[in-house]
Image: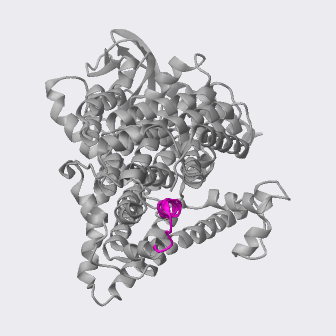
Amino acid sequence: MKLRIHIFFIFIFLLLQQSVFSQAPSPIYNIRVEAPEYIIGDQFAEIKITALNRAGMIDSNIADKQMLIINDDTTFINFRFGVGFYTLPIEKSTRITIAIPKIGIEKNKLIRYLPPWLSILPPLFAIILTLIFKDVILSLFLSIFLGVLILKGFDISTIIPALLTVVDKYIMESLRDERHLSIIIFSFLIGGIVSIISKNGSMNGFIRKISSYAHNPRSAELLTYSLGVGIFYDNYANILIAGNTMRSVTDKYKISREKLAFIVHCTASSVTAIAFITTWIGAEVGYINDLVLTFKVEESAYAIFLKSLQYTYFPVLMLAFIFFLIWFKKDFGRMYHAEINSRNAGVINESEEDTTKLKEEIIQTITPEEKRTRHWIFAFIPVFTIIITALIGLLISGARNTYFEMITSGIRLDSYSFAGVWEVLYLMDEDQHASFLKKIMLLIGKSDSYLVLLWSSFAGMFMAIILSVTQKSISFKNVMEMVIHGFRIMLTAVIILIFAWALGQVIEDLHTVEYLTSKFSGNINPVLIPAITFILAAVFSFSTGSLWGAMGILYPLLLPLTYTLALSAGLETKEVMTILYNQIAMVITGCIFGTLCSPIADTTLLSSVSADCNHIAHVRTQLPYALTVATVSFFITLLSLTGLPWLLNYLIGIVIIFLIVHYRGKRVES
């Protein structure tokens, strides 16, 4: 009985103690206020208020409702472990004042209001400046600076801090990303390989080897075409090597310089777009990966890139178009007249190109040296090493990642080996009858493509160096100089990449995609965006003459916009990804079409120089061909919106191209 009485009194005491503490909360001596510097559009700003003790440390004893004076209004804030939150609607720039009653401590914070339309200024500014100055790097830098000024506020006092923020935040953040660094290293290594196999004479030997198979105009053109397809890893190397070395062969059979420039130019740009190991792929995968990380897309960036090749209609149809022209010995328009004149009067050299306008370091680095010819095998092995290492690396990396994913999912494997993973791969796709190609694509999708790109490029570089050094006439010092020259030719592209990544981060901080989505959502069918993008990319790249610059501005802006619009339209994941694949392809193919037509594009100028062709003549003869293929490609893009299988779309496009060549083309006799 006494024990029960004691327990009763203890219980009453605890209740009284709790009541006293609840009625007399610990006083707040000081506060720290954290608020966003800016709000974009009509949003709510969340204010974080931290209670501090006399020592200036967080006071975790502060709990429950506490009275504060916020903008002269008495407000009760719920605190938990010394931290409370207050939500304030923002419709204009607002200064918030928070004071502690009776103590007299007051904190002030200015929250700037940014109209949402300001978010489109940086990418728009980049496009306009590029069109005006024809300098992509300067335009990108100034656009990043403008974006930072918008975030910090337009004031004289913010100019220097904004400039520093461009460097210490946005550019440095771009370089801190290990995936971005992987792409930069890959690009430099590929440039080094291109330089080695070009300058050591092995590529010259390869070309002289195949040149012996030319016996008539058609075979000479086919060899030029085949060489262009074979040098798939870089369009600059392709143009300069094929044009310079095949010129004497095509001259022998009275093939016009305009036709040579056309074959070299269009083949190089087209094959570089669809090959899976090129100097372009690092940039494309990097832009795609930013989307993957932002939206938590399940597929890897490299797998998305490979699937986007289903929609690269323009380069594929251009390759088919060139082949049909050569095989059936037909041409039309200005090219037909150029060929007829060349056959009748011989090759006319009207080149007036001022090569000082071109990038001399590219010409000097990639153009093979006439006096140095090595065995073709020294060029073949490094490129073959890149391809094989990439294929094996993708499969091994994909199998390893799939293994760990299976273990995490509770799937038991008999052995940790490629064969063991391959046998049960259907469990990851829920398709017990998955085809061989589908399994391959699944492994590639699970692979670490950035690591594989480094493996393949390093392996190719290693083989190129070893094979070059074994040639007794070339010292290790000279080979390393070739490598450094190769790095230089990729420097401009790498700088554009870095600035494009930084601009993409600025666009993300300004919520540009969200603003554009709010404007276009419900007003435009997401399915139509890829077709619109093709035209936009073509116009922009034609006006600027820069494929890299166009990609650097359009990819970071259009990919997130397309993905967001497709999601907001309520489409299923499969439909969203299909639109995304198409969009990725339309950006690169539109840029290729634009630069093929642009008289100020560097590849157009290089094609004229390598073929020793009058530059204006090259542009005029090539333009009708590029427009023809682009029109068919645009039609096939619209046709693909009906849901036809991608192989059928390509087949229809190739048939149309064949019919155009057959009925419009006129035969050019040898």
Is residue 214 a member of the stretch shown in magenta? yes
Give the x, y percent position of residue 233: 45, 61
Give the x, y percent position of residue 416: 70, 75
| Res 118 visible | yes
Quadrant position of residue 180: bottom left
Quadrant position of residue 522: top right
Residue at the image position 50 percent from the left and 40 percent from the top: 332
Residue at the image position 56 percent from the left and 50 percent from the top: 305
Nearest the camera: 228 or 464? 228
Nearest the camera: 363 or 582? 363
Residue at the image position 27 percent from the left and 60 percent from the top: 363
Q: Which residue lies furthest to the front in this view?
A: 344
What colour scheme has been applied to the protein in the rendered image? one colour
Secondary structure mainly formed by the magenta segment = helix
Q: Which residue lies furthest to the right in this view?
A: 432
Quadrant position of residue 37: top left
Looking at the rendered structure, the number of numbered marks drawn on it comes to 0
378 in relation to 638, above or below: below
Give the x, y percent position of residue 322: 53, 50
Q: Quadrant of the N terminus?
A: top right
603 in relation to 637, above or below: below
Report the span colored magenta: 212-229
Nearest the camera: 138 or 265? 265
Is residue 213 a member of the stretch shown in magenta? yes
| Res 549 visible | no
Left or right: 622 as drawn, with respect to 600: right
Give the x, y percent position of residue 454: 45, 67
563 in relation to 420, above or below: above
